Amino acid sequence: MGFAPTPESSVVALGRGGVTLFFLLSGYLIFKSVEAEPGPVFALRRFFKVMPSYWLNILVILALDLALTTFPHMGWASYAADAAVLTDILGTAPVSGVFWTLFVEIKFYFFILLQYALLGRRFSLVVVVGLLVIEGAVWLWRGHGSTTLAYFPVFYIGIELALAESAQWSRVHILRVVGLTAVLAASLVLFLDRLKWASAGYLIASVCLFMAFTGWRARNRPLIFLGVTSYSTYLYHSLVMTWVFETFPSMRSTPLGFFVLVGTMALAVAVGAVMYRLVEVPMVRLGRRLESSRLIPYIGRHDRTSR
């Protein structure tokens, strides 16, 4: 009997590709930010970019939880753990299935700050080897891998791409990118419990797409729009999907399911754009004002001298 993918399963599969590309691009961009900004400035900017929108999203989920009988009800411990970004440490169930990627991202912020303070640009490949050794030990100990540890090294392909770009794509740096991509694709196949080969293929495709478009300097407004609103879209797309498929349950197993899925993603992008404008932009502006204010003189002083 053949397997007929549902709209939800298609989103999960495509979402894994989005996660892979997201982590790769994050490694590239965050590494450049760490190099350009003093540690306190980096931390303050990441906080105002990420946390206010995240906490508001939790409040929206809580409101739906209390208002709708069909909504998956979560305990107060889950909400408290998510608000403190301790869900994966405390072992509680997250109130949203997409939060695991954000928890990995936040861990990377702290990790790369510490690594850059201690090592600068040096030994990034040594760090990756250390991460793979730890993942291998966890795999042997538990009998299965850790999704967090399996994906964490993907950030370092982004770092290698940033280093290759700054070195004018020298042959040595290109070989480093290709070699690391091959090793990490193999590690995803070995350590992941689900979507092993798809994740490895997405990783290779993401690197190829990045390298193909790196030299493309034209301003593509749709891609820029999707990029700047992507965080809010990420936070709200699962809520939009849940609402649509609960409202139109019969669409899941019909030929119209694909079109409902496309419309749902378009609606999620629209909601993300609205939340970006209403929440992200004001919070980022507030953070920038605090940088230059006397409330945080250390950050303001060092940020001005770093420009």
Image: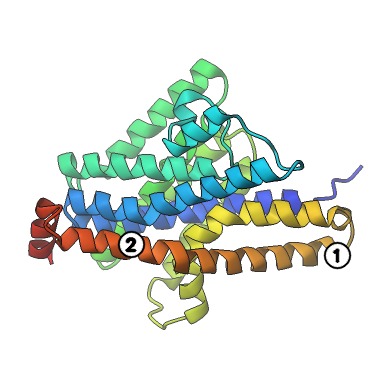
Can the viewer see residue 117? yes
Cα distance between the residues tagged 2 and 1: 40 Å
Q: Name the residue at 48% across, 32% down.
A: 80
Q: Name the residue under label 1.
A: 256
- Image height check: is 225 above or below 241? below
Image location of residue 238, percent across then percent down: 63, 51
Classify residue 169 by image quadrant. bottom left
> SS class of the residue under badge 1?
loop
Along the polypeptide, which appears first: circle 2 or circle 1?
1
The type of residue carrying mark 2 is Val
The type of residue carrying mark 1 is Leu
Image location of residue 183, percent across then percent down: 45, 42
Front position in the image: 20 or 8: 8
Q: Name the residue at 35% across, 60% down.
A: 283
Question: On the picture, is 181 further left or further right than 265?
Answer: left
The residue positioned farthest toward the front in the image shown = 67
Q: Name the residue under label 2.
A: 284
